[in-house]
Amino acid sequence: MFNYYGSKSKIVDYYPPPKFDKLIEPFAGSARYSLKWWNKQVTICDLNKDVIDVWEWLQSCSKKDILGLPKLVKGLDIREINISEIELKFLSFLVASGRPSNIVTKFMEHDNGNQKRYDKIANQLEKIRHWKILNCSYQDLQNEEATWFIDPPYEFGGEHYKNGTKDIDFAILGDWCKNRKGQTIVCENMKATWLPFKPMVKIQGACQTFTTEAIWSNIPTNYDNVQQTLF
């Protein structure tokens, strides 16, 4: 529904499907995996209060609230618009290419000032009405039998998050992931060593550079021996 650094929007279809009716996504961000499997018993959490504030607002707002937001045109400073504080937070994620921003760039000006995107978001609101949304640490979550989709700030690159790599002890996180009940899916890239990650898909980033997204799961996946390429 909104942009966030490290979003899985381009590769969400590569991850294994959930095997349990309950789906828990710590480090939620834009929660693309939960949105794909929205009809599960979804719990998302994040330490970033701005992220959780936006999710809670989206959960409570109407289609009219979304469709009434201003058009986003190049050069617009959203702080100069007469909107509420929570609408400003939401738009700051929407106009960003990854991190919150207040100025609409040419890159983010599309679809008639984002009107098509507003339409899409408005039509997704009913999908998240039943979600449980928490502002907490992953360590505060009860260990339940569920599908755990764990997408933390990456060991190398996580400094871009508000609550980033410096806030995580990866040895502790690795043990925590291994001890989850049910199905555990962990996201990283192949630079990381805190779990025995397998290459999943190679993706093209900025400046024609490539990174290899990686996966660890307590259940065998199709990626144990195979790597795919996404251009």
Image (spheres, grey):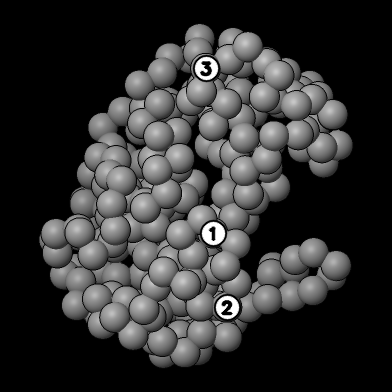
**Image quadrant where residue 40 sits:** top left
Query: Measured from the top left, where is residue 175 in percent x and y?
Result: 26, 82
**Image quadrant where residue 58 sits:** top left
- Sort mark 2 into few (<14), some (14-19) or many (20+) by Cα contacts within 10 Å: few
- Which label was assigned to residue 84? 3
The residues bearing labels 1 and 2 have C-alpha atoms spaced at a distance of: 12 Å
Residue at 62%, 35% in the rendered image:
92
Q: Report the front residue among 56 and 169.
A: 169
- Which label was assigned to residue 161? 1
- Sort mark 3 into few (<14), some (14-19) or many (20+) by Cα contacts within 10 Å: few
**Secondary structure beneath label 3:** loop
Residue at 84%, 70% in the rendered image:
208
Which image quarter is the C terminus in? Answer: bottom right
Lateral position of residue 36 relative to residue 203, left or right: left
The residues bearing labels 1 and 3 have C-alpha atoms spaced at a distance of: 24 Å
| First in sequence: mark 3 vs mark 2 | 3
**Secondary structure beneath label 2:** loop
Query: Measured from the top left, where is residue 159 in percent x and y?
Result: 57, 67
**Secondary structure beneath label 1:** loop
Q: Amino acid at mark 2?
A: Phe
